[in-house]
Amino acid sequence: MKLFARQKIPATTTLDIDGHPVLVLVRTNARARNYRLSIPHSGGPVLSLPPHGRWIDAEAFLQRQRNWLAARLPRAAAPVVFAPGAIVPLRGQDHLIVASGRTRGRVEIIEDGDVMTLIVPGAPEHQARRLTDWLKQQAELDLKRQTMVHAERLGVTVRALRLRSQSTRWGSCSSVGNLNFNWRLILAPDYVLDYVAAHEVAHLVEMNHSAAFWATVSKTLPDMERGRAWLKAHGRQLMAYGV
């Protein structure tokens, strides 16, 4: 006979932050070894539990992270919808979204003095998708070019390149040579996209984040710290676009 029944793990819980209830999503992660609190770029706080985690321990952990969460919530970027009038960065430069008024055509970039404009065709309900598709095409072009540059420098082969819409990752590399990238890298300055390309190609040499790995990144991109620092400072903001 069990003296204490195991508490059911809820799908959500709330945490009082400065007198305001904050909704926290609760997830069990099969790969997690410890309790973890995170703030994904496209949503609210998420509390992750290891497979055999207990809710009583998870609650205690969440309470201990109250100050950490309170300090970071204001930094969460508000979603930016791709709609006429919105400002969207492209390769690090702000562009104003303007509807073309035509149902057909291609996205165009127009420079009018100091104002850069993205002219987007399509019916209003399709414009966000049209712009997203175009941005993905631009990202693929830039990423293919830069991954080939770094692959040649490091003497490795990229088997395939795919775009993803991850909410927490900028890139990944498989052991067979497949590279995945977040399409929102096209919103960042060129040197940021170049850094992530170099980072993932370097994983074809070192599938870890050891000193040898970082030396490999530096070998193909000596100025890697510039892009790495920018992404740490501004990456969360980019994840809010097109949500």
Image (tube, rainbow, N blue to C red):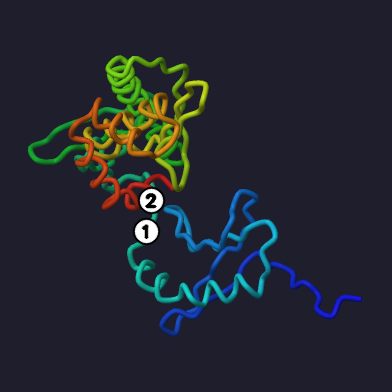
Q: Would residue 98 be found to the left or right of residue 175 on screen?
A: left
Which numbered disc flags the more N-terminal residue, 2 or 1? 1
Q: Is residue 21 above or below residue 95?
A: below
Viewer-closest of 103 and 72? 72
> Is residue 161 something that shows in the picture?
yes
Give coordinates of residue 1: x percent, y percent.
Answer: 92, 76
Q: In the figure, residue 33 lies in which quadrant?
A: bottom right
Q: Quadrant of residue 49?
A: bottom right
Residue depicted at 34% across the width and 68% down the height? 74
Apparent side of residue 189 relative to residue 127 in the rendered image (left or right):
left
Residue 239 position within the rendered picture, expressed as x and y whole percent measured from the top left: 38, 48
Image position, residue 233 (x, y; %): 26, 52
- Amino acid under label 1? Ala
Query: Which residue is most to the left?
Result: 113
Question: In this rendering, is residue 201 above or below 226?
Answer: above
Q: Disc 2 and disc 1: Cα gap in Å? A: 6 Å
Say which residue label 2 marks: 240
Packing grade of label 2 (10 A; few <14, some 14-19, many >=20) is many
Q: Would you name the residue on which mark 1 appears?
A: 78
Mark 1 is surrounded, within 10 Å at the Cα level, by few (under 14), some (14 to 19) or many (20 or more) other residues, namely: some
Marks 1 and 2: in contact by CB < 8 Å? yes
